[in-house]
Amino acid sequence: MRRAIFLGVISLAAAWLLSSASAVPPPTLVRIALGWRLLADRRLSVQNNFSCLDCHQPDRGYADGKAVATADGLNTPTLYGLAERTTFGWFTPEVRSLEEFVLRPLNNPREMGPITDSTLDRLRADPALRAAYAAAFPGAGEQITWEQTAQAMATAIRTIPRPRTSDLSAAALRGQALFTELGCSACHRGPTLSSEAYLNTGVSRDSRNSGRSRVPSLIGLAQTAPYFRDGSAATLVDVVRIYQRGGSVPGPGVNAAISPFVITDGERADLVAFLSSL
Ligand code: HEC
Ligand code: HEC
């Protein structure tokens, strides 16, 4: 895990060197380093039992391999591609930034919360950590706040590089064409293959946010099974089979772009080859 983090920081530093002409000043490397340290630190949870990376595991595509993570009944999404996104969370269109979202697991009693001052006191008692915050937030004095914590974490998350991919195989290329032909790209498009929309695709009867869930990115899918907000699809083959049926719970609330279709087993395999290569 440490190695993945180290490589993440190094590759970002290289990316900045290459894009040094950009107008926006890059966040400092110390803030990124602090962010990574905090993402891995269980002291940030009230009970000292969870760090962010316990659920968003770098070697599982920043997910956890479980159907659902907690009694909230939600699947852990990957942290890939979040620098390019404007919506966060399965059911939370009201959240406007990554910084804002990051406070949610910190405050959620079923994840690491609730947020308390005594949790911060634990961090403040660590001189090395105090120094790391002071270096990452120059001018703020030797203080440690939840706001700084969320900022450092969000900055670190934005540095996560996309998984390395190779050229598409012949099967994956056929799958890519099918992806467009079947209308998948109406919702999954752009660099992260999302569209930042919240829609009902007939995954379940969960009525949070009126049953409308956020269109996830499709980056690193090969590493992030199981799929869907409730983890109800164990494999990408299952995902495609569910779309073939027009959703698991077809009904009047389901988006009009979701309707049953017929493809051969070979075509399904092509589509899965494409999805596995993203
Ligand atoms: C117990 C497991 C667990 C822990 C611990 C956890 N997460 Fe999550 N994370 C989840 C689940 C489940 C969701 C989906 C929640 C939702 O949609 O409301 C999620 C969603 C996210 C998202 C939104 C991703 C997206 O695609 O929109 C971000 C960002 C995130 N978590 C970051 C963090 C950070 C930072 C921490 C530590 C402060 C953390 N998580 C701790 C399970 C966890
Ligand atoms: C109407 C918009 C829409 C269309 C069309 C659509 N999707 Fe989705 N897709 C979504 C939404 C919304 C979700 C999240 C559903 C959930 O879990 O609640 C999703 C989830 C997924 C996931 C799971 C990702 C994960 O990390 O859990 C995959 C894979 C996927 N779609 C592939 C496809 C394919 C392949 C097609 C075409 C056959 C397709 N989608 C068509 C909106 C759409």
Image (cartoon, helix red, strand yellow):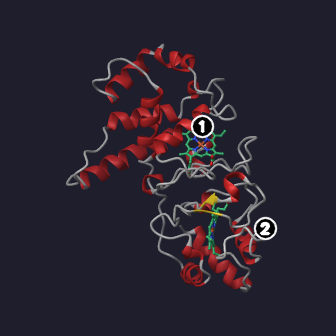
Lower sequence index among marks 1 and 2: 1
Give the image location of residue 99, x and y in percent: 46, 41
Q: Which residue sits at x=58%, y=38%?
A: 104
Give the image location of residue 95, x and y in percent: 52, 47
Query: In the picture, residue 271 is in which quadrant?
Result: bottom right
Q: Are marks 1 and 2 in contact (CB under 8 Å)?
A: no
How many discs appear?
A: 2
Q: Which residue sits at x=48%, y=52%?
A: 82
Query: In the picture, residue 18 is in which quadrant?
Result: bottom left
Give the image location of residue 98, x and y in percent: 47, 45
Q: Residue furthest left?
A: 21
Q: Residues within 10 Å of mark 2 (few under 14, many from 20)?
A: some
- Tag shown at residue 248: 2
Q: Which of 235 and 88 lies nearest the eye of the viewer?
A: 88
Q: Is residue 151 above or below residue 89?
A: above
Report helix, strand or loop for mark 1. Answer: helix
Q: Which residue sits at x=63%, y=56%?
A: 224
Alpha-carbon span between mark 1 and mark 2? 28 Å
Q: Which residue sits at x=45%, y=49%?
A: 160
Q: Amino acid at mark 2?
A: Ser
Give the image location of residue 142, x and y in percent: 36, 17
Residue occupied by mark 1: 105
